[in-house]
Amino acid sequence: MDLGTIKKKLASKTHYKDVYKVAEDVRLVWTNCMMYNADGSDFYILAQNLSKKFEEKFQKVLQDNGLVGQGQPSQGNADLVSLEEKKAFAKSLYKLTKDEVGKILVELDQKCPAALVKNSSEDEVELNVDKITPTMFAELVTFANGCIANHQGKGGKNSSKSGSKKKARTT
């Protein structure tokens, strides 16, 4: 996904059903940019900054149009995340590198901070998957699965087993 494609979809006036779908695609652009560029690189930092600006502007658009507090329109059971999916995601975190887990935490801190409990005295972050929005959950699962597939394509290399403490709680 790229901004040019989003612009074309917007111009067609038939692709996006609501502003939330546009926002999902814009977020995907920033997520992809941060996923495929090195942490701290110019592009990574630019994507982080643009993501933060976008979220601020998007919230203002929602407020200006009286959509704040209503949340994303419900799509019935499509928005529900099963306990099995949450457990599978939590287990998949152990297959990721430290950098990849860090990217997930940065995304959550920016877009869904309620899902993180920070313990600064122990330099730990606890992730509560129950507090991740369904849309954000889907993005994170896609990212994690992509990383895991990438590891398997490189001969199963996994550097996340190097003594890091990661906690995932599904309560």
Image (spheres, rainbow, N blue to C red):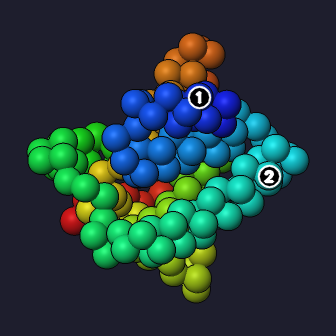
* Residue denoted by label 2: 46
Q: Where does the image place residue 161, in percent across and percent down from the top left?
A: 55, 42
Of the residues under marks 1 and 2, which one precedes in the sequence?
1
Q: How many marks?
A: 2
24 up-or-down from 68: above or below: above
8 or 46: nearer the viewer: 8
Pinpoint residue 95: horizontal percent, then vertical percent: 47, 37
Image height of 92 relative to 133, above or below: above
In the rendered structure, which amino acid carries the disc numbered 2? Leu
Q: Is residue 50 left or right of residue 54?
A: right
Numbered disc 1: secondary structure: helix
> Which residue lies at the image location 18% right of the left edge and 42% below the top edge?
78
Is residue 124 visible in the rendered image? The answer is: no
Q: Nearer the viewer, mark 1 or mark 2?
A: 1
Q: Quadrant of the C terminus?
A: bottom left
Q: Is residue 75 above or below residue 58?
A: above
Q: Please, which residue is most extreme toward the bottom here?
A: 121
Vertical position of residue 71 compared to residue 93: above or below: below
Residue visible at 67% across and 64% down?
53
Q: Decide which of 106, 161 is in the foreground and name it.
A: 106
| Residue farthest along the left direction in this orientation | 77
Q: Position of residue 156 (x, y in %)?
A: 55, 20
